Image: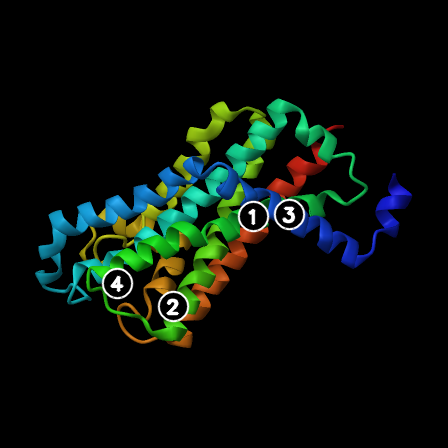
Amino acid sequence: MSTAVTALTASGRLRIVVALARRGLNEVLRVPGASIPGVLAPTIFLLGISSVFGAAAKLPGFTADDFKTFVVPVGMLQGAAFAGAATGVNLARDIERGWFDRLLLVPAPRLTLLAGLVSSGALRSLLPSVVVFAAGLALGVHFPGVLGTLLAFLLVMGLSTCLACYATTLALHFRTQQAAPLMQMGGFIAVLFTPAYAPADLLAGWMHAIAVVNPVTYVLQGVRQGFVGPVTWSGTWPALAAIAAMLVVLAALAARGMRQTGR
């Protein structure tokens, strides 16, 4: 087995990653109902929060003229959180059914298998984020421009990859779909404790303190560019650095879980 793994070429590993990512995406077509909550929840939340708190944009110090424009990036990141959690839930289901044990027999490094699993989450995050984005435009949200749009979706996919690694770690540890609430809660809390619904300067003391140290804050600020203000490098590199730092830590934990599985 070790010889086969060593002999596997880069193109062979890439084909495995693509096959696993395609398998994850096929679920959207074969079981579309499973994707509905992750699409509807952030969209409905966007509509509801905009209707109830739309006048918040009139507060002194609010950094956007339109509240809907301010919160659309939050809905997009919530979609990324749902997609990342779904990756872990699907893996836990495969573990319960024994399919994952057969996957481990594939003569490929565990990191290759992990890359295939989490990449499906990154691609799946495009579905809810596109729906939220389209709903926002339909409501009159400011169009962020081509560069702002591309950057927003890139950061959404990056955050979804990080949260897919987090959910994968939990799935490998608990090996049951009953851990799904923990997988979903991590992403929800990470997005919630940011300047999601008000600028950082308007947050209460303890919420401001948490938002400052929360790396997802910088991701949100990166996505929010174009929607609220111009796209700048000074607003982009902290978001990219935050995703890179989270990915290093969470991917390492997921890789450790992959290596320990089946021993």
Image quarter of residue 76: bottom left
Residue topped by disc 1: 120
- Type of residue at label 2? Thr
Mark closer to the observer (4, 2): 4
Residue drawn at x 27%, y 54% as measured from the top left: 195
Q: Earlier in the sequence, mark 4 or mark 3?
A: 3
Q: How far is the residue under mark 4 from the one under mark 2?
A: 12 Å
Name the foreground residue: 194 vs 43: 43
Residue 53, how many percent across, how many down? 13, 50
- Type of residue at label 1? Ser
Circle 3 packing at 10 Å, graded few (<14), some (14-19), many (20+), is many
Residue 261, how many percent across, how many down? 70, 31
Q: Secondary structure at mark 4?
A: helix
Q: Earlier in the sequence, mark 1 or mark 4?
A: 1
Up-down relation of residue 114 to residue 97 (above or below)? below
Residue topped by disc 3: 116
Circle 2 packing at 10 Å, graded few (<14), some (14-19), many (20+), is some
Q: How far is the residue under mark 1 from the one under mark 3?
A: 7 Å
Residue topped by disc 4: 137
Asked if the residues shown at circle 4 and circle 3 are in contact, with their CB atoms under 8 angstroms apart, the answer is no
Q: Which mark is residue 149?
A: 2
Q: Earlier in the sequence, mark 2 or mark 3?
A: 3
Residue drawn at x 42%, y 40% as measured from the top left: 35
